[in-house]
Image: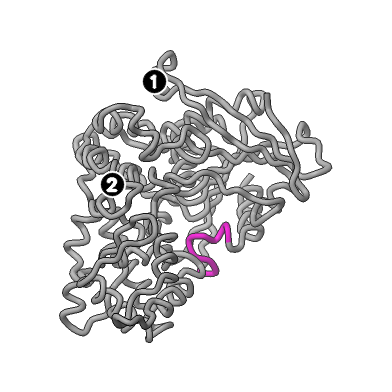
């Protein structure tokens, strides 16, 4: 039975569903999904169309809003919103170092994880939609990886959609994982240089921290091992609207004097741990490269790690040996993540098996997208660190009728930073198109 309760300005209802683990085997094992319905106080939900929200990631549950925050305020003026925890996240059969051993061996865990990409997420959505909407199509709003899911939705089940809204999440339809990262590292380098231009004092601060960690890797609260490579991965902040400023404030508090000489401060170490740990979203690390895998014959094989080797400016040891600034990395997953993070260490063999796996199937249907009839609008951020802008625009041209809003007003997290305005702009575009 669905349970309803209230927050300021909203009525929330919990929904639980069971769906097949493998939709190709509907009579096989089933898993549980959770979703939270949100309706504005005073509105009759039965008179409202549905909007399905798909969070970014992979590996993150839907955002836990309080009242009418961010884009939700705009959506609730005319929609009944469903915040879906995608399978493996939040309260939808969560996957982590504690639950995955229930699947058995690392090989069995890896085979299980094959079913946690956008194709399965979309089939979940289609499985639950008829019972919620009475069979009517709904609008989907996809942020980042949620946009990848929305693009797959348009490829495979457009009859389930009345409109698609995508923010920072138009994927390349054909790029391999290697090609994704070959395009990513130059963007990440640009973000580094922009950060150092804004905060030139951080060049020496970052070098000093890296040199310290090269001699003495630090153990963070909870057992995370902060190596130079792990420190570099704080660059994931540089893709967010205020991320450069967050990174600057973290670096300026790095050292404190102690009887034994300067040491990394507890405040810095705790701040780094909160940003680096995958304890709350391990699925992100496990399947991150698999979301780009579409060639049945080719494994992802730690694409980011291999591609990084061809970009020597990201080699911290070389930077420290000379006078170059140390460059941070970004949204990349590497084998060392599974040796430094206690949330991932038990899953190392599983990750290796996924990286070596072949048999991945294509996620997008270019021919079907070229014949698309669903109104689609996408916010494309002109120098998005996480999703290549050129790829997004190429995909926009490949999807019939898709309208873009290309802007430099926001970074990748624009739907959070300017949510009401971003959503309003996309709704205007799809309605103008209709």
Q: Is residue 194 visible?
A: no
State the image quarter where residue 46 is shown. Answer: top right
- Which disc, if any, is residue 322? none
Q: Which residue is mark 1?
A: 24
Q: Which residue is mark 2?
A: 345
Residue visible at 74% across and 45% down?
78
Look at the image and give the residue range highlighted in magenta: 408-416
Considering only order in the chain, which callout, 1 or 2, is on the residue closer to the N terminus?
Answer: 1
State the image quarter where residue 101 is shown. Answer: top left
Q: Nearer the viewer, residue 49 or 223?
A: 223
When the figure is inspected, residue 223 is found, relative to residue 164, above or below; the finding is: below
Q: Is residue 399 left or right of residue 337?
A: right
Q: CA distance from mark 2 to mark 1?
A: 32 Å
Across and down, in percent, residue 155 comes to 44, 36
State the image quarter where residue 132 is shown. Answer: top right
Q: Nearer the viewer, residue 286 or 195?
A: 286
Q: What is the crowding at mark 2: few (fewer than 14 residues within 10 Å), some, or many (at least 20)?
A: some
Residue visible at 72% across and 47% down?
76
Q: What is the crowding at mark 1: few (fewer than 14 residues within 10 Å), some, or many (at least 20)?
A: few
Across and down, in percent, residue 342 comes to 33, 50
Residue visible at 42% across and 45% down?
58
Q: Is residue 254 left or right of residue 314?
A: right
Q: What secondary structure is marked by label 1?
A: loop
Q: Is residue 332 left or right of residue 42?
A: left
Q: Residue lying furthest right in this view?
A: 42
Predominant secondary structure, magenta span: loop
Coloured how?
Answer: one colour
Across and down, in percent, residue 403 comes to 54, 52
- Classify the position of the C terminus by image quarter: top right
- Classify the position of the N terminus by image quarter: top right
Does the magenta run of residues contain 415? yes
Asked if the residue under mark 1 is in contact with the one under mark 2, i.e. CB atoms within 8 Å, the reply is: no
């Amino acid at each position: 039975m669905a349970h309803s309760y209230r927050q300021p300005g909203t009525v929330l209802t919990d929904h639980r569903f069971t769906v097949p683990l493998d939709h190709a085997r509907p009579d096989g094992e089933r898993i549980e999904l959770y979703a939270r319905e949100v309706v504005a106080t005073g509105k009759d939900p039965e008179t409202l169309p549905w909007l399905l929200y798909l969070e970014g990631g992979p590996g993150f549950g839907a955002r836990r809003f309080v009242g009418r925050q961010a884009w939700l305020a705009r959506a609730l003026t005319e929609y009944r919103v469903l915040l879906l925890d995608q399978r493996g996240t939040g309260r939808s059969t969560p996957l982590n170092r504690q639950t995955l051993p229930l699947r058995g061996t690392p090989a069995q865990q890896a085979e299980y994880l094959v079913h946690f990409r956008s194709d399965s997420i979309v089939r979940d959505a289609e499985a639950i939609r008829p019972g919620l909407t009475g069979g009517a199509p709904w609008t989907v709003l996809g942020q980042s990886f949620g946009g990848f899911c929305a693009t797959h939705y348009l490829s495979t089940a457009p009859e389930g959609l009345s409109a698609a809204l995508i923010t920072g999440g138009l994927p390349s339809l054909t790029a391999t994982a290697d090609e994704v990262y070959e395009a990513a590292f130059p963007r990440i380098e640009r973000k580094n240089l922009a950060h150092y231009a804004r905060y030139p004092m951080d060049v020496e601060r970052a070098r000093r921290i890296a040199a310290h960690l090269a001699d003495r890797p630090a153990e963070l609260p909870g057992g995370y091992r902060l190596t130079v490579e792990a420190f570099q991965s704080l660059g994931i902040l540089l893709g967010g609207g205020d991320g450069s400023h967050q990174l600057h404030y973290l670096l300026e508090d790095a050292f404190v004097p102690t009887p034994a000489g300067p040491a990394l401060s507890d405040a810095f170490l705790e701040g780094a741990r909160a940003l680096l740990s995958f304890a709350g979203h391990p699925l992100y690390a496990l399947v991150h490269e698999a979301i780009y895998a579409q060639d049945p014959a080719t494994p992802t094989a730690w694409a980011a790690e291999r591609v990084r080797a061809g970009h020597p400016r990201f080699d911290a040891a070389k930077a420290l040996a000379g006078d170059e600034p140390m460059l941070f990395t970004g949204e990349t997953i590497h084998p060392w993540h599974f040796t430094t993070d206690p949330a991932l260490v038990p899953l190392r063999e599983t990750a290796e098996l996924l990286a070596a796996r072949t048999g991945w199937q294509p996620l997008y249907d270019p021919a079907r997208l070229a014949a698309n009839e669903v109104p689609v609008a996408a916010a494309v951020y002109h120098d998005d660190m996480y999703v290549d802008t050129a790829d997004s625009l190429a995909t926009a041209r490949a999807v019939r009728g898709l309208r873009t809003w290309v802007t430099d007003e926001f970074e990748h997290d624009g739907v959070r930073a300017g949510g009401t305005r971003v959503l309003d702009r996309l709704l205007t575009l799809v309605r103008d198109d209709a």
